[in-house]
Image (cartoon, rainbow, N blue to C red):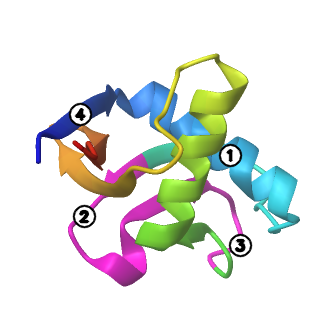
C-alpha cells in the first residue's frame, strides 16, 4: 500500500502563538509577564517550556507535553486553513528552533 508522509514545519514564533492560544483555550493559567524564551526539547513530558519574565520565581514557566503541543499545532492548522488529513497518524518532533508536525497516511488500494 502506498504511504504518504507530510512534514509541516513551524517556526518558533508560530509555535509560540499556537501554544499560547492552546493554553488560553484550555483554561491553563499563564503567568503575568512577557515570554522571555521558548525552549523545545525531545522529552515527551516537557516538549515545550515557555519561560516568562516575572518577578515571582514561582510559576514563571509553563510546561507542555508532546500531546498538548500536538493539539496546539492541529488547532493552529485548523484556524489558519492548513489542510490536514483527518485519518492520518500525527506526531510532533523538534526541528531546528521550532517543531515539525508529521502526518502519516496509508492509502487503501483495492
Disc 1 crowd, CA 10 A, few/some/many (<14, 14-19, 20+): some
Q: Which numbered disc, 2 or 3, marks the residue that appears first in the sequence?
A: 2
Q: Residue 7, which numbered label?
A: 4
For label 2, the SS is loop
Q: Point out residue 59 in the picture as x, y percentages from the top left corner.
A: 68, 76
Q: Secondary structure at mark 4?
A: strand
Residue at 26 percent across and 77 percent down: it is 43
Q: Residue 49 appears at what percent x and percent y?
A: 45, 63
- Residue shown at the point (43%, 46%) measured from the top left: 37
Determine which residue is flagged by label 3.
56
Question: Looking at the image, is mark 2 or mark 4 nearer the viewer?
Answer: 4
Answer with left or right where residue 15 lies relative to residue 100: right
Q: Earlier in the sequence, mark 3 or mark 1?
A: 1
Cα–Cα span, label 2 and label 3: 25 Å
Can the viewer see residue 53? yes
Horizontally, residue 51 falls left or right of residue 41, namely right
Number of other residues with Cα within 10 Å of mark 2, as a class: few under 14, some 14 to 19, many 20 or more: some
Q: CA distance from mark 1 to mark 4?
A: 22 Å
Residue receiving disc 2:
41
Image disc number at residue 20: 1
Q: Which element type, helix, strand or loop, lies under badge 3?
A: loop
Q: Which residues are magenta?
A: 38-57
Q: Nearer the viewer, residue 29 or 85?
A: 85
Q: How far is the residue under mark 3 from the one under mark 1?
A: 20 Å
Amino acid at each position: 500500500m502506498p504511504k504518504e508522509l507530510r512534514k509541516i514545519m513551524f517556526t518558533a514564533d508560530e509555535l509560540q502563538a499556537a501554544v499560547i492560544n492552546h493554553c488560553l483555550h484550555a483554561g491553563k493559567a499563564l503567568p503575568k509577564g512577557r515570554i522571555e524564551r521558548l525552549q523545545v526539547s525531545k522529552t515527551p513530558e516537557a516538549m515545550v517550556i515557555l519561560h516568562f519574565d516575572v518577578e515571582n520565581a514561582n510559576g514563571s514557566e509553563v510546561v507542555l507535553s508532546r500531546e498538548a503541543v500536538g493539539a496546539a499545532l492541529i488547532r493552529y492548522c485548523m484556524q489558519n486553513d492548513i489542510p490536514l488529513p483527518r485519518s492520518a497518524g500525527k506526531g510532533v518532533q523538534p526541528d531546528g528552533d521550532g517543531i515539525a508536525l508529521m502526518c502519516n497516511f496509508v492509502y487503501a488500494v483495492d
